Image (cartoon, rainbow, N blue to C red):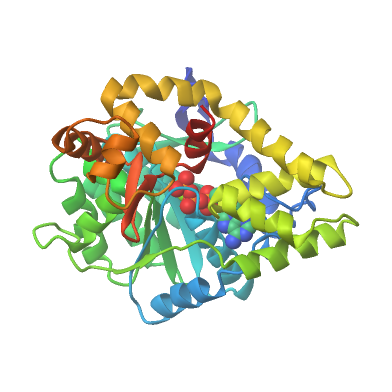
Amino acid sequence: MMEGYVCNTGHTFSYTFAITDIVPYISLRNLRNEIFEMRKPSNPFIVTGYHSPSYFCDREEELAWLREQFLNERNSVLYSWRRMGKTALVRHFFYKLQKEKTADGVFVDLLGTVNLAEANKRTAQAILNRFGGLEKGLGTALKKLIGSIGATVGFDPLNGTPQITFGMTRGQSVSGSLEAIGEFLAERKKPVIICIDEFQQVSTYKESNAEATFRTWMQDFPMLRFIFCGSHRHMMLSIFSEESRPFYRSAQIRQLDPLLPEVYARFILSHFRKGGKRIDPPQLERIFGWTRQQTYYVQLVCNKLYGKTEKVEDDLVTEVFGEIIQQEIPLFSSYQQLFTAFQWKLMLAIAREEKVESPMSQHFLAQHGLGAASSVSAALQALVKKEFVIYQDQHYTLHDTLLLRWLQGL
Ligand SMILES: Nc1ncnc2c1ncn2[C@@H]1O[C@H](COP(=O)(O)OP(=O)(O)OP(=O)(O)O)[C@@H](O)[C@H]1O
Ligand SMILES: [Mg+2]
């Protein structure tokens, strides 16, 4: 018998049930994920998560790299600016591996975690989601794992999702729990690849040994393969390339660039055509320019246009840009509180220029009434540290394209 259940809404219930009670729920979920194909989407431009290869554009080169890394037992780091498509790429890779039956991918998302205990819970939950639904039930190995990490499994009565709960029984240390998880994965017949998404989060945990704990885990199970993803370029690079840190040179690093415009254009045109709709190449060029090819925003613009019309007109493109910005205004307005008046003014100046090569130049300072170069230097540092402003290809620009477009319109 097992007890303890925490529901998604945060309310905690105590619930006692035999382990067989939860099997039907887990099986259903697994059947849904692994056997049935998901229904065809009514709009081919997916803006949440990953669907299937038909709705995923290209990334052949990156996919080949991930495959090559895996086949040669190397760990990978994938980073890029936000919303470029890291998570979707790994999901695409795992989808292919699953179809080929060559490996099992486990996806652990550390977004929002603040300490090792939460990271451990996310990892255990990911294992349960991935392997907990075999038609036969939980399986001896998984039951043993759940017991040995001091967890219980409950389910959400609203949606039947199996959920792991720690703390209802006397828990183990995080490293002991990771060890048990590692053993479980290493004993599986097929190779396992673990993607740890938003990995930079680990370096913000209050425990000083957080990175070392994960590094030890990785070293203790050399036959598990890891993909570390993250959107904080600076933090990700520091974790893997600073000599003094545990993950120094433990994985190969790759940046995810925007999709090639001609390749993305072909993908978009073909989906419009298949749906009996029309969009013209010059309109695509405009969309790529406005979104700076940040994948999520291209998808969002195309999703809206596709949903609104049979034949895209230029005015509609303008209207959709406006609509997208409009939805973000409450958030963007709240950003102002995060900065001093001068930092905000500098951000506005950079947005107006779109790209700035020399923010300390007399021309830029005079043009935007920014005063002394030393004040700009200090404010710029603060903006870069918060990753609102980024430096790439020899210029400064805003990280978030929508914020940039909104500020440009003020
Ligand atoms: N190659 C692609 N083809 C079609 N859609 C894509 C592609 N890559 C990503 N997307 C879509 O773009 C959106 C953003 O992708 P994703 O969430 O993977 O980005 P990310 O880099 O992980 O972002 P974040 O930094 O916020 O974690 C998703 O809705 C995804 O469906
Ligand atoms: Mg992501």
Q: Please provide percent x and percent y for residue 26.
A: 60, 44
- Residue depicted at x 18% and y 39%: 377
| Count of numbered marks | 0
> Which is more toward the observer, 225 or 234?
234
- From what the image shows, is residue 57 above or below residue 157? below
- In the image, taking residue 379 as reference, residue 183 lies left or right, namely right
Answer yes or no: is residue 33 visible: yes
- From what the image shows, is residue 382 above or below residue 279? above
Query: Furthest residue to the left?
Result: 244
Q: Quadrant of residue 316?
A: top right
- Residue depicted at x 34% and y 33%: 368
- In the image, taking residue 156 as reference, residue 87 lies left or right, namely left
- From what the image shows, is residue 52 above or below residue 199? below
> Which is more toward the observer, 46 or 323?
323
> Which is more toward the observer, 368 or 380?
368
Q: Please provide percent x and percent y for residue 273.
A: 85, 62
- In the image, taking residue 88 as reference, residue 355 lies left or right, namely left
Q: Quadrant of residue 118?
A: top left
Q: Please provide percent x and percent y for residue 327.
A: 61, 27
Answer yes or no: is residue 132 visible: no
Q: Please provide percent x and percent y for residue 153.
A: 47, 37
- Residue depicted at x 28% and y 66%: 221
